[in-house]
Structures are given as C-alpha cells and as structure tokens.
Image (tube, helix red, strand yellow):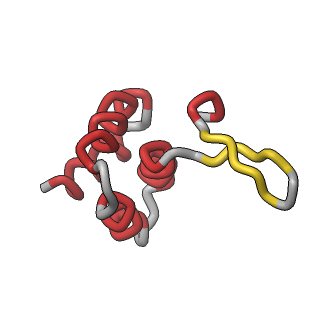
C-alpha cells in the first residue's frame, strides 16, 4: 500500500496518504461492526468504478471474511 500511496505535505513534512481503494481494503480486513457503513461512505465519492476495480483486483489477497463483507456490501 505504501508504494501506491500519494504523497502529501503536512506542516512541511512529506507523508504517504493511502488511496481510497486501499482504505477500503484495510477496512475490509478489519471487518468490524462499523466497517460496512464506512466502506459504503468511501464508495459514495467520485470515480467509484475505478475504486471498485482496484478493490476487486486486490481482494483475493485478503482473508475470506473480507470477501464475504465485500459481497454483502455490493449486494
């Protein structure tokens, strides 16, 4: 994820910022009770088709529970 992160400057320091798809993947991995809603909010932004494609490309690398949550959200 770090290699895909965008660089941003905060108080003169360059820091990596995760892409929206990577935030979704991290949230799927966590799989907590609030996470489905959080992911739905992340999907509400612009360029959703590209984000979904990025998530689905990386999803097989996550544990099975992450795929189950993703399918539930996408229904």
Question: Foreground: 7 or 61?
Answer: 7
- Name the outermost residue toward the right: 12
Question: Foreground: 74 or 18?
Answer: 18
**In the visual, does 25 lie left or right of 73?**
right
Residue under the image location 49 percent in, 43 percent down: 22
Q: Position of residue 68 (x, y in %)?
A: 27, 47
Residue under the image location 50 percent in, 50 percent down: 23
The number of numbered badges drawn on the structure is 0
**In the visual, does 57 lie left or right of 22?**
left
Residue under the image location 30 percent in, 42 percent down: 67
**In the visual, does 38 lie left or right of 3?**
left
**In the visual, does 1 lie left or right of 74?**
right
Q: Position of residue 44 (x, y in %)?
A: 30, 63
- Name the outermost residue toward the left: 75
Question: Foreground: 68 or 2?
Answer: 2
Question: Foreground: 46 or 53?
Answer: 46
Q: Position of residue 75 (x, y in %)?
A: 12, 56
| Above or below for 40 versus 28 | below
Q: Quadrant of the N terminus?
A: top right
Residue under the image location 33 percent in, 28 percent down: 57
Q: Quadrant of residue 41?
A: bottom left
Q: Quadrant of residue 34?
A: bottom left
| Above or below for 51 versus 4 | below
């Amino acid at each position: 994820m770090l290699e895909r992160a965008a660089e941003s400057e905060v108080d003169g320091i360059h820091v990596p910022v995760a892409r929206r798809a990577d935030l979704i993947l991290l949230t799927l991995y966590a799989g907590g009770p609030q996470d489905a809603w959080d992911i739905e909010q992340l999907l509400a932004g612009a360029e959703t088709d590209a984000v979904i494609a990025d998530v689905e490309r990386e999803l097989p690398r996550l544990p099975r529970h992450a795929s189950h949550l993703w399918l539930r959200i996408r229904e």
